[in-house]
Each structure stands twice: as structure tokens, then as C-alpha cells.
Amino acid sequence: MIIQTPNKRRENMRTIPTLDALQRAEVQAAASPHRFPDGGQYRVEIPSVEGPDTAALVLNVADELGVPIHRLSQGSGVTMLTDSEIREYVTIGAERHVEICLFVGPRAPWDGYSAAALTPDGTNVGWRHVGLRSLRAALDDVRRATSLGIRSILIADEGLAALIQVDKENGTLPKDLVVKASALLGIANPIGAALLAELGADSLNVAADTPIGDLAAFRAATSAYLDLYIEAPDGLGGFMRYHDLGDIVRVASPVYTKFGLRNAAGIYPAGAHLQQLVHASATARVRRARLGLDHLMRQYPDAVMSPLGVDRRGIPVQQ
């Protein structure tokens, strides 16, 4: 039996900032002194890259449009991928020096373990893992993906974050595995973000409509990377933050600028039956990234982008 003493609980809370300190950060909205390990303030992420064929397409279009890409993330889940498809992702990421971030497959609205997740008042469950069977399946997804060379995983459950951290500490999972917390986790405020980082999340996708002052408070609360949709899908509000990009990079650094797509049909879980839509929407996301980078250079010409491939964390490892 492990007993959490009051002293131990106080020790765990020492890194959590005070509300007064966060309110000062919000008002000041000062430039962040933090950077990625390679010295960059921002990186580019293209989400909803469903399947290795789509990953190859996205990178080809990015070359044509002159869009540097640091991370490709996927939403349908590891469960929906064969080992061969995961290995293809790994090869593409390793050869192009791009982080490949795969979502775990189980999630409350899909796996049948939580009818409440489908009710109006139960949607706050999000894509978490209800019950031990779903949690175990999610951890198995992480272990399978990493055994095939994936080094970045996308999660939406605090319990899974804690289990992954335990696995990293005991050597079951690679210590350099990047854990990205999804927007579906509902990271509502800087204190919650700091607690999630304490659990082992490296990259935190905060809400797309987070005001600049609040972004500064998030940054004051944690040194974890922040992720922000510059254009969010309709399911997350459809917000478009192109004219805020300069300030977003200035106060939230190190930050992943993430280019989703408003006014687009849902594609999860993807498959051959949706291939045309998946490819068309992926191509549009790369163009949105080009637009975003152009806006950023006009607003904040001195912004420093991470050089591609220098920081190897998250980039797949060929087995």
C-alpha cells in the first residue's frame, strides 16, 4: 500500500504557480523567454494526416508550397493501423526528419464502455478511457506503436499519461517518447496544464480560442510545449487565429502552430472509403499553413522557426 502523506502532497505542489503570479503574467503578456531545444520559438504541425499515403502527399505538397513541417499528427488511432502501415509512417518520418504523432485508438465515444459519453451531459468525458479495459487497450496501442519505431503519441486521458510515465521510468517505453495531450482533453486553465505536465505530458494542445493574455499565463505555468490550432476544425469551434499569429508565437514560445481546417467534413476513423476527402483536406491544410507562415512573417519578422531535423525527439526510429 502506498500512502500519500500531506508532506509529499505539498512537495508535488511546489512547482504549481500561484494564481496571483498567473494573473500578473496574463496582464503583462510578456514575450516568452523559453525556446525549443534547437533554439526555435515555433514549429509547424499538420493534423489529421490519416495513413502513410497521406503523410507522403502532405510532404510533397509542402515541398511545392515551401512549407517546413515539423510534426504530422494522426487522429484515427493506432488501433486502426496495421503494423505495415505504422512501419511506413516510421520510414517517412525518419527519412524526412519529421515527427510522426499517432493517436491511441480507444476512446469513450467509440469503444462502447461509456454510454454516458454519448449523452448531452456526458460529453465532458471527451475521448478518455472509461474503465480498465479501455485504458489497457490504449496502453497496448502505445507499446505496439513504439515497438515499431514511433516516438510520439497523442493521448486524451490523464490516467494514460500517468501510466505512460511509469512505463518510461521502468524502461518498458522509450524515455525519449513524446507525449502530446490532445485538445480533446479539455485543458481549461494554466493550473490544469501544469498538473498535466507533471504527469508527463510534453506537449499540451490548449483551446484554439485561448486569448493572448491567457496564453502568457499558460506559458508562465509550465515549460511544456504548447500546441494551438491557428485554424480549428468545426468540432473544436472553427476558430481562425491568423491575425494573432505574431503574438501567439511571441508569448507562447515554444509553440506548435497547428493548421486544421474549418468547414470540412469529419474523417475519423479514416479509411479507403474516405480517401479522396482525406487527401483533399490534407492538401488544404498545407495551404493553410503557407497562409499562416506568410501572416507570421508580416506580423513578427524576427520570429525564429525551429530548424528541421536538429531536435530528434519525436522523430521515428527505423527498427
Image: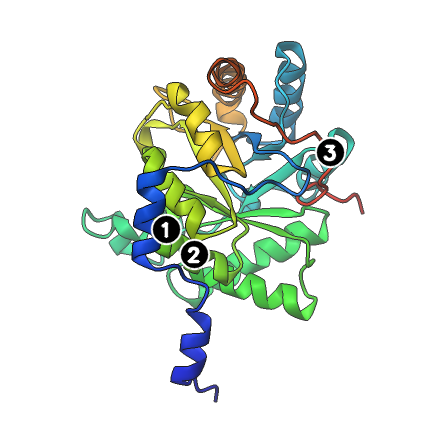
**182 shown above or below 51:** below
Q: Using a 10 Å C-alpha cutoff, classify the residue at mark 2 as few (fewer than 14 neighbours), some (14 to 19) or many (20 or more).
A: many
- Kindly identify the residue that appears in the image at 68 percent across and 65 percent down: 172
**204 shown above or below 249:** below
Do tag 1 and tag 3 residues touch (Cβ < 8 Å)?
no
Q: Using a 10 Å C-alpha cutoff, classify the residue at mark 3 as few (fewer than 14 neighbours), some (14 to 19) or many (20 or more).
A: some
Q: Using a 10 Å C-alpha cutoff, classify the residue at mark 1 as few (fewer than 14 neighbours), some (14 to 19) or many (20 or more).
A: many
Q: Secondary structure at mark 1?
A: helix
The amino acid on which the numbered mark 2 sits, given as a three-letter code, is: Ala
Q: Position of residue 52 (x, y in %)?
A: 65, 30
Q: Single out the residue that lies furthest toward the right.
A: 319
Q: Position of residue 137 (x, y in %)?
A: 52, 59
Mark 3 or mark 1, which is nearer the start of the sequence? 1
Residue bearing the label numbered 3: 309
Q: Is residue 243 visible?
A: yes
Residue bearing the label numbered 2: 194
Q: Is residue 107 left or right of residue 56?
A: left
